[in-house]
Image (spheres, rainbow, N blue to C red):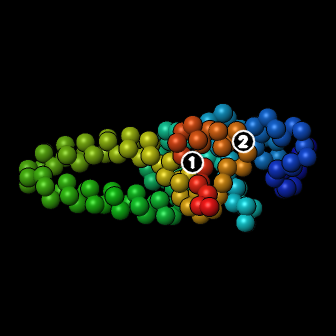
Amino acid sequence: MQDPFRGFNNDDDPDNQNGDGPQGLPLPPNYATVVNPETGNMRIAKVGFSWTMFIFPPFPAMFRADWYNLFCILGVELSIMMVLSMMVPVNQLAQFFAVGGWEMLRGFLWGALYNMMYFKHLFTRGFVPADDRSKALLTRARYWSQPKDND
């Protein structure tokens, strides 16, 4: 049985070159691994549409302890709800459909944007792709761009 508390990636292990995650666990093809070289922290997350954010906003941000994006999302949500409640006439039926329309639209909005927001915030905190497969996946999805050297 494999020890789950052992170190994460072993660069000397030839089996670790096939897109496996920590401890040799296989990763789905649309998941990327990023690591902070200074602290050694590692994060694994999906690249692409976030179905969990589509169905259960804002819980994925809370479960990932992604407080920055959680407060950004809540700020946008509160601002839009405030604007909708002020702009729509006092007619409660019109207000119901305006708010209901936003509720339907927000699932698509956060589902499409959240994983990108998560990775971009990790990159600003010093994380980089952990391997070539993750780097290629993040580059193809336009989440990661190679930092330019200022010589």
130 left or right of 101 in image: right
Q: Relative to 147, is 46 above or below?
A: above
Q: Is residue 70 above or below residue 57?
A: below
Q: Quick one: SS at disc 1?
A: loop
Q: Residue at x 31, y 45 (%)?
A: 103
Q: Position of residue 2 (x, y in %)?
A: 89, 45
- Label 2 amino acid? Asp
Near mark 1 (Cα within 10 A), the count class, few <14, some 14-19 or many ≥20, is few
Pick the front one: 49 or 38: 38
* Closer to the camera in the image, 45 or 81: 45
Q: Residue at x 23, y 60 (%)?
A: 82
Q: Secondary structure at mark 2?
A: helix
Point 69% across, 60% down: residue: 36
| Residue 53 on image: x %, y % | 47, 46
The residue carrying mark 2 is 132
Relative to residue 126, is residue 68 drawn left or right?
left
Q: Residue furthest bottom?
A: 39
Contact (Cβ within 8 Å) of mark 1 with mark 2: no
Q: Earlier in the sequence, mark 1 or mark 2?
A: 2
Q: Residue furthest front?
A: 151
Quadrant in which the C terminus appears: bottom right
Residue depicted at 89% across the width and 38% down the height: 14
Q: Amino acid at mark 1?
A: Ser
In the image, taking residue 73 as reference, residue 126 lies left or right, namely right
Question: For mark 2, does the 10 Å Cα neighbourhood hold few (<14), some (14 to 19), or many (20 or more) residues?
Answer: few
Q: CA distance from mark 1 to mark 2?
A: 13 Å
Q: Which residue is mark 1?
A: 145
Question: Percent position (x, y) of residue 78?
Answer: 30, 60
